[in-house]
Amino acid sequence: MLDPVSRVRRFNRAVTSAVGALDTSFLGRGRPLGAARVLNAIGHGRADVGEIRDYLGLDSGLMSRLLRSLEDEELIETTAHENDARRRIAKLTSAGKREFNAYEAISNRQAKDFLSHHSQGEALLAAMDLIASALGRDATALHEVDPRSDEAHYCLGEYYAELARRFKQGFDVKLSRDPDAKDMVRPRGSFIVAMSDGLPLGCVGLKGGGREFAEIKRLWVAPAARGLGLGRRLMDTAEHAARDLGIALLRLDTNSALAEAGQLYRRSGWTEIPRFNDDPYPDLFFEKRL
Amino acid sequence: MLDPVSRVRRFNRAVTSAVGALDTSFLGRGRPLGAARVLNAIGHGRADVGEIRDYLGLDSGLMSRLLRSLEDEELIETTAHENDARRRIAKLTSAGKREFNAYEAISNRQAKDFLSHHSQGEALLAAMDLIASALGRDATALHEVDPRSDEAHYCLGEYYAELARRFKQGFDVKLSRDPDAKDMVRPRGSFIVAMSDGLPLGCVGLKGGGREFAEIKRLWVAPAARGLGLGRRLMDTAEHAARDLGIALLRLDTNSALAEAGQLYRRSGWTEIPRFNDDPYPDLFFEKRL
DNA sequence: GCATATATCTGACTTTAGTCAGATATCGTT
DNA sequence: AACGATATCTGACTAAAGTCAGATATATGC
């Protein structure tokens, strides 16, 4: 009945009117939208005036006036940057914090109302995650982090949970050859997470060590971000890190139950090889020469 | 990592900036946003000035001026309503149609760009459908239509396809007791479809005939609209139609593979009864006294 | 036929957003 | 100390959106 273009446009229409309502809700406190946006940007931790200007896409004259009006309301204070007196740093006063909290309460209230109107929620939330990830794809940044960091931990937890769901025999981390975190930290290896607007969307580990090859481990992409090419980006970044570390040969093991992963490897230059370890879970082995 | 409220707010943030971009694209033809919105409303078939004003939420003075400016550009013409000379009817001129088509081309272009940036698409499109349906839930209208109409046909096609997927033994319409369309048209019965912004989201048939009971048939809800209470609304409307037609007893057959449907029936006052027909597909039978 | 309601239009106004040129202060470099 | 580059601010302006009080014409109910 509807072609993809019409479906995208239908979504746009639905969302445009919903967003219009969100905008007007920011007008509920007797302050124009522009000033409210600046106040909220500061409340969310942006302090550098130039950064806020870029983020909100404002002209410097307009920005200056909005700051002045918030200062007149005694909601913010500005001071010079400590190392560069040309730059200004904005901070909420205690009245500003109260006002910011009131805006936060409005936003939370709206989100709750939305959820209570659509109580069957998990499918809807998953769809919202997927779309937020897709729209913010350009904003999904890959970072090298310590595999023992919070973000990494979260990703690994989700990864193990998914393996447990997808393997007929379940999955127990202890039985698998859990790579020592030190092998996934420079200079031996690397661990990369993809973050979008505070939400970890995927990870991959590069496990070095004393051998003639390094291994790719723990490639995971959040369900909310599948189909957006994130797996490919993670793998590319891991390979890049491997080259950077002077690694010439990469290997990985996987399971045929993880069909998407197998496809990705085959499509990006990996070749199947015989088993090279005695881990009980994998049944498929690949390598790639850099 | 994220609670539901934060997930909704993340979605709102992502979508707000995307919608901002859509808005500015409507400025690409040297016309203010307000005038462009009115022109597009008229192009999409809204003719009554008051209706457009309500739809766009405009003040009558502003609306009047926007119409005037479009008239000055010779993009629209207004005439009095034929039965009520106070009301005005707006129509595109041929120049107006060209201009409207140019806006349509921009919208289509944007939708295509979006799709090509997210090529793995079907999961994303399904998520967009779900969200558009959820946001437009209040706008989902149930209509009584002829079961041979296009909308009904589309719904039935999707319904059969889904049965074929979900039944182990497949599904062949010809083997099932396909109710004669005439039994689902007044005064014998009824056929109801749910439409949201042009997309059929569900259907249900009420099949009358010469017997002591009428049957509920072909209850279907589009995947994009599940969990929004549409099944319940369809059933309520069908029951209402049945009462209207003086029907005192309803029966239906279903299959235990369709778990959601069974739940819905049980929760809305239906009681399980023994088999009352020899259709090969159903294995569960219900009735409800009105 | 008259009073009242309804739909639209006009004029006068305000607020908000945005633009742009140039002023001011500070920084980094030589 | 002098230079250009950078960050912010100020003043003067425009465009767009929105508000509100009537004016005008038509419809409806009694």
Image (cartoon, coloured by chain):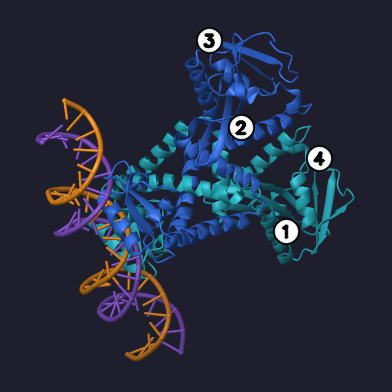
Chain colours: A cyan, B blue, C purple, D orange
Q: Is residue B111 left or right of residue D15?
A: right
Within-10-Å neighbours for mark 4: few <14, some 14–19, many 20+: some
- Residue A119, x across and y down, in percent: 50, 30
Label 2 in the same subunit as label 3? yes
Label 3 amino acid? Answer: Ala
Q: Nearer the viewer, mark 4 or mark 2?
A: 2
Q: Are marks 1 and 3 on the same chain?
A: no
Q: Secondary structure at mark 4?
A: loop
Q: Which residue is mark 2?
A: B148
Q: Position of residue A215 (x, y in %)?
A: 78, 54
Compute the Cα span from label 4 to label 2: 54 Å
**Where residue A203 sits in the image (x, y, percent)?**
66, 50
Given the image, what chain letter belongs to the residue carrying mark 1?
Answer: A
| Residue B1 visible somewhere in the drawing | no
Query: Which one is closest to the eye, mark 4 or mark 1?
Result: 4
Q: Quadrant of residue B226?
A: top right
Q: Earlier in the sequence, mark 4 or mark 1?
A: 1
**Residue beneath disc 4:** A281
Disc marking residue B3? none
Query: How far is mark 4 from mark 3, CA to CA?
Result: 60 Å
Question: Is C8 displayed left or right of B46 in the figure?
Answer: left
Distance from the alpha carbon under mark 4 to that under mark 1: 25 Å
Residue topped by disc 1 = A188
Q: Dot 3 corresponds to which residue?
A: B248
